[in-house]
Image (cartoon, helix red, strand yellow):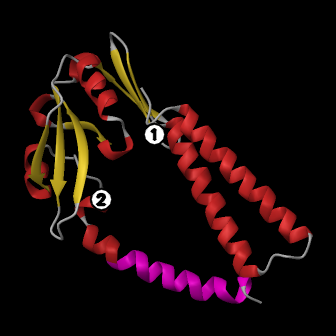
Amino acid sequence: MSAYGHRLGVAVLIVGGVVAVAGIAMAVTGRLNNRLAAAFLAVIGIAIVTSAYMVNARVEVSPVEIRVRGLSGLSKTWPKAAVQGCAAFSVSFALGSLLPLLVVYGAGHRTLFTLQASYWDEGTLRELCYAMGGFEYRVHEISNRELLERFPGSLSFVYRHSWLVGCLFPLFAIVLAFVLAPIVFR
């Protein structure tokens, strides 16, 4: 089972390719300025990352093991017997944002892996829960603190420290803009 399937990932890659060809054609004919080139590169980069996720992200369930493959194509494997359950949550954060999350856990409610449910079809998540041991897929609302108490390791660094990422990312973007501006906009 994969996130949205291969067709969408391939379609996004094709769109990224068309944008790249159009950008190259505009550059060769002299109709491309530096700002437009930067916009084309951004669109191409987003298309490539999105298609890589769509093509690579998957969960494979066999009678003896569960394999989770991420964006990079690297995979982690657990024995199917290690799965004690899965739970779907709509996780709320301090500023009111919600994160749909599927937590697959082992003994002691220790998180084996999580899937961001917004990237997956709900029917696929139901099938996945059933394939891992007949677990029911039902969404519960919970705060991020409660989730971490019940399922340690269920949230990544970015979600555990969103305030820090929220402050550092804009700062990094501003510094990057000042560094790249003289190069891109000569």
Q: Which residues are magenta?
A: 167-184
Main SS, magenta region, reads helix
The residue singled out by tag 1 in the image is 70
Residue at the image position 26 percent from the left and 73 percent from the top = 163
Left or right: 16, with 154 as reference point:
right
Q: Quadrant of residue 63?
A: top left
The residue singled out by tag 2 in the image is 157
Which residue type does callout 2 highlight? Phe
Q: Nearer the viewer, residue 15 or 99?
A: 15
Residue 116 in sight here = no
Measured as percent of width and height from the top left, residue 110 is found at: 16, 37
Measured as percent of width and height from the top left, residue 6 is found at: 55, 32
Residue at the image position 19 percent from the left and 17 percent from the top = 134
Q: Nearer the viewer, residue 152 or 167?
A: 167
Q: Can you tell which of label 2 and label 1 is closer to the viewer?
A: 1
Whole-Å distance between the Cαs marked 2 and 1?
A: 17 Å
Which residue type does callout 1 highlight? Gly
How packed mark 1 is, by other alpha carbons closer than 10 Å (few <14, some 14-19, many 20 or more), is some
Residue 90 in sight here = yes
Q: Quadrant of residue 84?
A: top left
Give residue 144's mark. none
Residue at the image position 15 percent from the left and 68 percent from the top = 94
Question: Dividing the image into 4 quarters, which one contains the N terminus?
Answer: top left
